[in-house]
Image (cartoon, grey):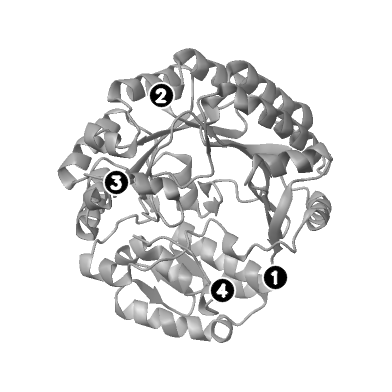
Amino acid sequence: MNSSIEFDVDLIQRYDLAGPRYTSYPTAVQFHAQFGEMDYLQAATDSNRQQRPLSLYVHLPFCGTVCYYCACNKIITANRKRASPYLDDLHAEIALQAARFDQQRPVQQLHFGGGTPTFISDEEMTALMQQLRRHFQLLDGDQGDYSIEIDPREVTPAKIKLLRELGFNRMSFGVQDFDPKVQQAVNRIQSYEQTAAAVEAARSSGFHSINIDLIYGLPFQTVDSFALTLDKVLALNPDRLSVFNYAHMPHLFKVQKQMDEKTLPSASTKLAILQYVIERLTQAGYIYIGMDHFAKPDDELALAQANGTLYRNFQGYSTHAGCDLIGLGITSIGMVDDTYSQNVKSLEEYHDYVSQGKLPVYRGVRLTPDDKLRRALITQLICLFKVDIAALEQAWAIDFASYFAEELRQLAVMADDGLLTISKDTVQVLPRGRLLIRNICMVFDRYLRQGQAQRFSKVI
C-alpha cells in the first residue's frame, strides 16, 4: 500500500476541527446508564455462541507521580500498599467475568494499561497473571499478543525479565520528550540513559516488539528541540512509534492547570513539529499507519495494513479484528458481541460491586444495525484509507449511493480539496487526506450530524 503523506498546511488549518479518535463507533459519548449488568450478561451469552477468541484489557490506575499533561484515569500515590485492596477486587472481577465466558475461548490479545502497570510489586504482578491464567485460556509459546505499558522510571532489568517470563512479549515505553526543560514543565523527569537501559533490557529479555510514545504540543517544544528528541528515539530503534497531539483541556483535566499556557507552542509551531516528525520518520523507513502511529515495514501493523486486515479498538490499532474484548478494572471498556460497556470509575464503587458478586458495569450501548454498518465503514477508512463500496453493499444489503447520499455530497467537497477520490466501487483517501482521516470519518458519524453534545480534541 502507498503510505505517502502530502502535508498541506493551509488545508490542515482549514480542516483542524474537534472530532473523535474513533477507537470505537459509536464513541463512548453515546454510552448510557440504561445499559447495565443484565445487558452485559446477555451479550456474554450471545458472544459464547459465536465462539470468537478473546482480548483482555487490564487497567492498573496507580502512578507514583503525576504528569501534568495526562488525561488518563489514574490515582496518584506514593504509597504502594494502596494498590493491594484494588488488586483483591481485580482478582474477584477476573473470576466473575471468566464465569460468564466459555473457558475454551483462547485469549489472543492481552494488554495491561494505566496509570502505571509496573507500579505494583513483582509478587503482585505474578499473582495477577496467575489469576488470569487460572480463569482464562491464555496462550503459551508466544502465540498471543501480550503487551504492557512501561514507565522506564519504574522498572529494573530484573522486573522486565520477570514480565517476559510471565508471558508478555510486547512493551510500550512512555517517553513524551527528552528535553529537560520540557520534562520539568510537565513534571516527568526521565533521562535518555534511563530509557535506553530499559529498552535494552526488554530486547535482551526477548521482547518481540518495542513501541515508544511521544507527545507534541507540550510546553517549550520547538521544531529544533523535538528534532533532538526524535534523534535519540530513533537511536533506540523502536519497532513502532506513537506521536500524539497534546490536547490542552484544563476544564476537563484539572492537572493540566499546573502548566503555564503561555509556554505551550503555537498552532503553527505544532504543525511544523508534526510536519518534521512525518518527514523524519518516513526518511528513517517507518510506515505511516494512520492517526499518530508509525511502524517499521516488517512490523505486524504494517503487514496487516498491507493485506487489509488492520483493525482499530480501544487500545488503538490492532491485528486482532475477530476478538471480543473484556475490560477489567475501573473505567475499563469492553466490546462483547454487539455491545460496548464501561466499568465504574471509582475504587469505592468498584469494591461495592465486586464484593457483592456483581459485574461493575455502569454504562454502555447496544449497537443498532446502522451503527454496525457505519462502524465497518469507519474501520475501513481509518485502517486502510479506503472504502470497498461493493463489499459493503453485499455484506449489508444496501445501495451505497442511496443509503449515504448526504455523506457523498459532503465527500464531494473533500474530493474537490484533493483529500480523496470517489468512484462507483471505491472511496480512496489520497496522500493529502491521510492526516485528516478523522474528518473524513466524521462525515459518516450519524451522532455528530444529529448535533449531540460532544467533547473531543482537535484532529491535528
Q: Earlier in the sequence, mark 4 or mark 3?
A: 3
Which quarter shows the C terminus? bottom left
Determine which quarter of the picture holds residue 192.
top left
Of badges 4 and 1, nearer the viewer stands 4
Label 1 to label 2, Cα distance in Å?
Answer: 45 Å
Residue bearing the label numbered 2: 153
Residue bearing the label numbered 1: 368
Residue bearing the label numbered 4: 447
Q: Which mark is residue 236?
A: none
Give left or right: position of 405 versus 459.
Answer: right
Of badges 1 and 3, nearer the viewer stands 3
Q: Earlier in the sequence, mark 4 or mark 2?
A: 2
Q: Position of residue 140 (x, y in %)?
A: 66, 25
In the image, what residue type sits under mark 3?
A: Leu
In the image, what residue type sits under mark 4?
A: Tyr
Q: Earlier in the sequence, mark 3 or mark 2?
A: 2
Secondary element type, mark 1: loop
Q: Earlier in the sequence, mark 1 or mark 3?
A: 3
Determine which quarter of the picture holds residue 108.
top right
Give left or right: position of 326 versus 309.
Answer: right
Q: Nearer the viewer, residue 122 or 293?
A: 122
Secondary element type, mark 2: helix
Q: Position of residue 340 (x, y in %)?
A: 67, 57
Q: Are marks 4 and 2 in contact (CB under 8 Å)?
A: no
